[in-house]
Amino acid sequence: MEKFIVKGKTALSGRVKISGSKNSAVAILPAAVLTANTVQIDNLPDITDVRTMISILENLGVNIRRRGVDAVDLTPGSLSKVAPAYDLVKKMRASYYFMGSLLARFGQAEVPIPGGCDLGPRPIDQHLKGFSALGAKINIEHGMITLTAEKLTGARIYLDVVSIGATVNLMLAAAAAEGKTVLENVAKEPEIVDLANFLNAMGASIRGAGTDVIRIEGVKKFNSARHTVIPDRIEAGTFMLAAASTGGAVTVEDVIPKHLEAITAKLRETGAKVILAPETIRVEADTPLSPSDLKTFPYPGFPTDLQPPAMVLLTAAKGLSVVTENVFDGRFNHVDELKRMGAHIKVEGRTALIEGGYPLTGAPVTAPDLRSGAALIIAALAAEGDSEISAVDHVDRGYDHFEGKLISLGASINRVHDKGFENRAGNLD
Ligand code: EPZ
């Protein structure tokens, strides 16, 4: 594992280019196996999860041609296996998207049950309910999920829970199912729309992505396509919150401001200045911040993935802020680490009370997962004194050259190998 040594009291300033969306890329890459023809994907983020996903594709027999760090050509013509490599799949939860895409291509898929992880229980009952409705037989034993379908047939499926993963997986399977599928109460995230655009470019017939109801007419054949992944709204929001948390002034470039409305509104509520332009957003926070209550919800609500960095911002706002985490049961792992840095936070179930205005102080802390890790790095930049942040490999999974981008904004961060650290947490996110 690796750790960061971070110098505190740094107001970030400058401009930073945002990379392609991790959560879009990890859905689009498995989707490529629907066709035997070549698909070209551009604007991929240079992160561990994308490299792992490409290794899984290679192991399945997909022909890979890298075009620089952010582009890849995939030709799944010679795809033979229906069971992605166990050791690779266990590294990332999103590899369960091969259930939907391999089922659609071959009528068969075999993947390990995705483990629980630091965000609390993460069941996949809605995925499995949908696959059954489409005609798949599901067998779960020895920790493996095996799906088989003589034929996939369109169905009407109502999700009991708004789930990004289930929406992605069922879109992938339904795209090749015979007849019409109607998916209701689905996720409306921009990454869902991005995937639908990619699938339609390959010849799918998907309408309504971005609304509660997605209508899919199955097709038999998928062709070549070229697709540019949308910008990562979570990376952009992380830098916007980092600018405000450190009292800096940062412009994020190559973003879609529409995807960041909830973050923009929340920042303005705390008194930060947010200036919008067609493809950039500038955040300036040179005045004291005010407390603000925050509730996470599926899109277009405030994203749960930005709740940890937003909590760091609220520790700097003098007064009481209430954070309610409505998406996951256990997404407050960053709280104990922030308290080691002097934050005054009390957690009751899904609610955290933040008493802001107490300056943070540098301390040795450990990143429990991807977004908590980013939050701790922001806290270390805002704190008095230096901090050591262990297990930053979590952060590498979802942020493209995070320390390099922060250093270009004035941060002082050193990455060192962490000999003493046992990798406590799994890598599932
Ligand atoms: C996606 O995870 C994201 N991951 C997560 O981002 C994100 O936090 C999450 O959506 C919520 O926005 C990717 O896109 C790869 P869900 P996912 O299914 O699909 C419950 C990051 O940091 N649920 O939308 O696993 C579930 O327990 C990661 O980039 C069921 O009950 O999330 C949760 O409470 C972390 N049954 C809620 O729904 C199911 O079958 C939302 O989960 C599926 C989900």
Image (cartoon, rainbow, N blue to C red):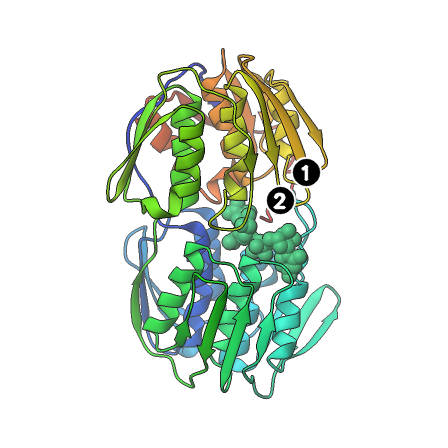
Q: Residue 243, can we see it?
A: yes
Q: Does label 1 point to a residue whose CB lies under 8 Å from ligand 1?
A: no
Q: Is residue 231 above or below residue 54?
A: above
> Given the image, on which type of amino acid does mark 1 rest?
Arg
Q: Residue 91, can we see it?
A: no
Is disc 1 surrounded by few (<14), some (14 to 19) or many (20+) residues within 10 Å? some
Residues at discs 1 and 2 in contact (Cβ within 8 Å): yes
> Given the image, on which type of amino acid does mark 2 rest?
Asn
Q: Residue at x 45, y 20 (%)?
A: 381
Asked whether 10 or 245 is in front, the reply is 245
Is disc 2 surrounded by few (<14), some (14 to 19) or many (20+) residues within 10 Å? some
The answer for how far apart the CA atoms under marks 1 and 2 are is 7 Å
**Where residue 223 sits in the image (x, y, percent)?**
33, 78
Q: Residue at x 45, y 62 (%)?
A: 211
**Where residue 167 sits in the image (x, y, percent)?**
53, 64
Asked whether 17 or 396 is in front, the reply is 17
User: What's the mark number on residue 326?
Assistant: 2
Q: Quadrant of the N terminus?
A: top right
Asked whether 128 or 53 is in front, the reply is 128
